[in-house]
Image (cartoon, rainbow, N blue to C red):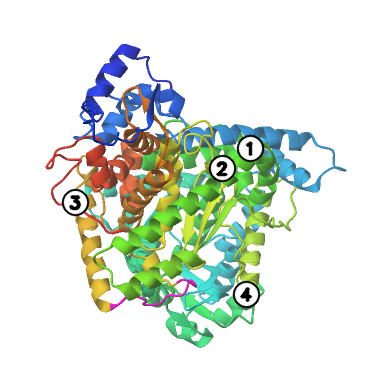
């Protein structure tokens, strides 16, 4: 929310599964002559795990599910699965579906390359973009030509007053030196778009990479400096100049990192909302020519602006006044090269991959066709999605998703009534927010247009033109009513999301496939997999961030003081629980960074379970799969969508930048807090999966 295991004899499966399942009820004594006969129970149908949608070969039956359920559900899969060389991690659900989608998209694009120019214009565009990307010879022959005008200007920056105009030019192409600009909903008036100015301008994944003083962080910084120098030499700098450039880049980026907010700080919506007018921005950063900036972007009338961090922009202003021009020249040149590296000749792509290896542990470069599919999806996603949807998105998927949303919604409304920490007034506001929540499924009602030129022989140029068009499209929205039908993901994406400012859940066509949803799978399995995803996204509306927005998407304090106090105590339990987990030995999960996702995981699995029980209430037939009850099948489905392997390097990086907990703890962390899990697997109190002091929020 991101494999064939060895054969296990059926006899072993049945024997061991039976020991984990709930014991069969004892025979019922014959009723007395005067007693009324008991109503017949549901008929029990014995089936295989595979027939209901569970991978029996993934289980590690040597593990006690009450000790480590994730290992029980996924252990054999983990043992027998190899991470593909071009991946840094592999997740049984997300990556397997993505691989299938990727092949479909490749076929669409290869066919589009061959389409006649008098046929479908959309196919022509995606075909030409993909063709330009795949033509490595043309890319190598072009060299630095696509970015040479920008590099030349960077090399000739001699006066501080020239910086504003040059940053404007970079931003028009979507190269985010120093900071970035976009449009988004006004936190206090979700019906309109305003301009947002945000911290940016770093080459490493996060500001902490520059500030931490542990040995691993120092090693990564050393590798990064070497990487910058190598890329600058490839771009024509001599060794001495390249080494100096790498030193300057590290110095400038470190200064920017020090004034940037941490990932945890950025999780507080109130701290990100600092509305100012044009004079307010000029006061924060007087060394930057803001009038010239907005005029250069083509939007001189922009007035309403939000800065996500006043500290960052005032700090940036100080840097503009004291950093020397030679350092700025090297910094800006690097920003250009780094932003376009994967669209440059092979020697740049290869060197860029070396740094990616350091950060993620990925062993091999992805084949070019995969990179070109991803690039086409990034720049022309909703054109590429149209043929994809026709091929891969059946009507049953949308109907099922709607059924899930309604079932889980009913579970939420019922669950809210049982909360002992929420007063009646706040419960009513919570119900109203849910009832106002919208859900988009499959693909947009109106497809996005892409009004930029695509040249079948100019990949880097296409990339820059695509980025420039997106910048312009975003800024054109400022001052206009919010388009509630706009999507933030492309339909082939294997993911889902909730947006607090629109108060809506979105489920792209890409994720509505096995193992998340399978038309052949049972209700418990589909609810344990895709149901958990739906419940997760719904709960985001009420996590520590989403709960600060009302039903209309406005940042509003709609909780009573006492309820807010109780909520904070509940969430503190989650912070402490997950903060004790280790992603890899010595690297702890950041309980504050992952709080929102952990709340959503815990609430999501509870809602999905309650929805499953409601849908199966009164069933005339129940299926026991290789000895596993339907409740157990539900939890196995949840566990198996998160079966995962990853290299230590990516685990370390994700622990620093990812708001999600590692898959292991997305399973064990949330299920250990759910009494229904302990009941399903007969876990004794005090075992890891049935702790005495479990956390509960929603």
Q: CA distance from mark 2 to mark 3?
A: 35 Å
Give the mark nearest the N terminus, 1 or 4.
1
Give the mark nearest the N terminus, 2 or 4.
4
Q: Which residue is mark 2?
A: 510
Region of the chain picked out in magenta, as a range: 551-560
Q: CA distance from mark 3 to mark 1?
A: 41 Å
| Other-residue count near label 1 (Cα within 10 Å), few / some / many at <14 / 14–19 / ≥20 | some
Tags 1 and 4 in contact by the CB under 8 Å rule?
no
The answer to whether residue 696 is above or below residue 525 is below
* Position of residue 494 in the picture relative to residue 430 (left or right): right
Q: Which residue is mark 4?
A: 481
The answer to whether residue 449 is above or below residue 528 is below
Q: Residue 392, labelled with which disc?
A: 1
**On-image quarter of the C terminus:** bottom left
Single out the mark in the foreground, 3 or 4. 3
Dot 1: what SS?
helix
Question: x%, y% of residue 182?
Answer: 55, 68
Q: Residue at x 63, y 34 (%)?
A: 104
Determine if the magenta segment contains residue 196: no
Tags 1 and 2 in contact by the CB under 8 Å rule?
yes
Q: CA distance from mark 1 to mark 4?
A: 33 Å
Q: Residue 218, labelled with which disc?
A: none
């Amino acid at each position: 929310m991101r494999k064939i295991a060895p054969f296990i004899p059926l006899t072993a499966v049945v024997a061991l599964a039976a020991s984990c399942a709930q014991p069969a009820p004892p025979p019922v004594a014959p009723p007395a002559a005067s007693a009324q006969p008991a109503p017949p129970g549901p008929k029990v149908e014995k089936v295989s795990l595979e027939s209901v949608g569970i991978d029996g070969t993934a289980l590690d039956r040597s593990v006690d599910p009450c000790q480590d359920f994730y290992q029980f559900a996924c252990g054999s899969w983990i043992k027998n699965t190899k991470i593909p060389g071009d991946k840094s991690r592999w997740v049984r659900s997300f990556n397997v579906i993505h691989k299938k989608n990727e092949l479909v998209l490749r076929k669409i694009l290869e066919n589009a390359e061959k389409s006649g120019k008098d046929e479908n214009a959309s196919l022509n565009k995606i075909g030409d973009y993909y063709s330009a990307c795949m033509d490595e010879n043309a890319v190598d022959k072009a060299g630095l030509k696509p970015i040479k005008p920008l590099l030349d200007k960077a090399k000739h920056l001699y006066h501080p007053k020239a910086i504003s105009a040059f940053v404007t030019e970079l931003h028009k192409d979507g190269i985010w030196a120093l900071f970035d600009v976009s449009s988004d909903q006004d936190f206090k008036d979700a019906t309109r778009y305003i301009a947002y100015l945000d911290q940016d301008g770093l080459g490493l994944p996060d500001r902490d990479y520059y500030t931490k003083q542990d040995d691993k962080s120092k090693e990564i910084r050393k590798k990064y400096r070497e990487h910058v120098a190598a890329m600058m030499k490839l771009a024509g700098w001599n060794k001495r100049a390249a080494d100096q450039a790498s030193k300057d880049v590290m110095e400038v980026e470190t200064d920017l990192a020090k004034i940037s907010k941490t990932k945890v700080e950025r999780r507080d919506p109130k701290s990100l909302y600092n509305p100012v007018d044009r004079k307010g921005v000029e006061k924060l950063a007087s060394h930057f020519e803001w009038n010239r900036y907005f005029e250069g972007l083509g939007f001189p009338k922009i007035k309403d602006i939000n800065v996500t961090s006043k500290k960052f922009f005032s700090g940036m202003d100080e840097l503009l006044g004291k950093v020397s021009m030679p350092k700025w020249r090297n910094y800006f040149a690097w920003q250009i090269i780094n932003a376009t590296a994967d669209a440059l000749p092979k020697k740049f792509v290869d060197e860029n991959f070396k740094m990616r290896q350091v950060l993620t542990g990925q062993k091999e470069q992805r084949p070019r066709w995969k990179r070109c599919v991803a690039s086409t999806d990034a720049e022309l996603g909703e054109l590429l999605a149209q043929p994809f949807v026709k091929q891969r998105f059946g009507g049953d998927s949308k109907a099922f998703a709607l059924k899930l949303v309604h079932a889980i919604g009913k579970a939420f409304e019922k669950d809210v009534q049982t909360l002992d920490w929420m007063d009646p007034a706040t419960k009513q506001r919570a119900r109203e927010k849910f009832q106002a929540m919208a859900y988009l499924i499959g693909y947009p009602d109106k497809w996005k247009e892409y009004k930029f030129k695509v040249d079948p022989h100019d990949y880097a140029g296409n990339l820059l033109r695509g980025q420039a068009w997106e910048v312009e499209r975003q800024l054109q929205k400022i001052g206009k009513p919010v388009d509630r039908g706009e999507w933030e993901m492309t339909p082939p994406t294997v993911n889902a999301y909730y947006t607090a400012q629109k108060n809506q859940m979105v489920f792209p066509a890409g994720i509505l496939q096995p193992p998340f949803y399978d038309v052949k799978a049972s209700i418990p399995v589909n609810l344990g997999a895709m149901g958990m995803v739906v419940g997760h996204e719904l709960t985001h509306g009420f996590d520590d961030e989403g709960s600060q927005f009302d039903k209309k998407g406005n940042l509003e304090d709609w909780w009573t003081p006492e309820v807010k106090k109780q909520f904070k105590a509940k969430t503190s339990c989650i912070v402490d629980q997950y903060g004790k987990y280790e992603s890899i030995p010595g690297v702890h999960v950041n309980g504050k960074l992952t709080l929102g996702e952990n709340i959503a995981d815990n609430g999501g699995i509870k809602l999905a379970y309650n929805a499953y029980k409601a849908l199966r209430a009164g069933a005339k037939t129940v299926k026991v799969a290789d000895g596993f009850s339907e409740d157990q099948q539900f939890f196995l489905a949840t566990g198996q969508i998160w079966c995962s392997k990853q290299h230590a390097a990516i685990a370390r990086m994700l622990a620093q930048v990812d708001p999600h907990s590692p898959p292991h703890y997305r399973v064990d962390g949330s299920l250990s807090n759910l009494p229904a899990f302990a009941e399903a697997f007969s876990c004794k109190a005090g075992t890891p999966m049935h702790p005495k002091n479990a956390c509960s929020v929603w």
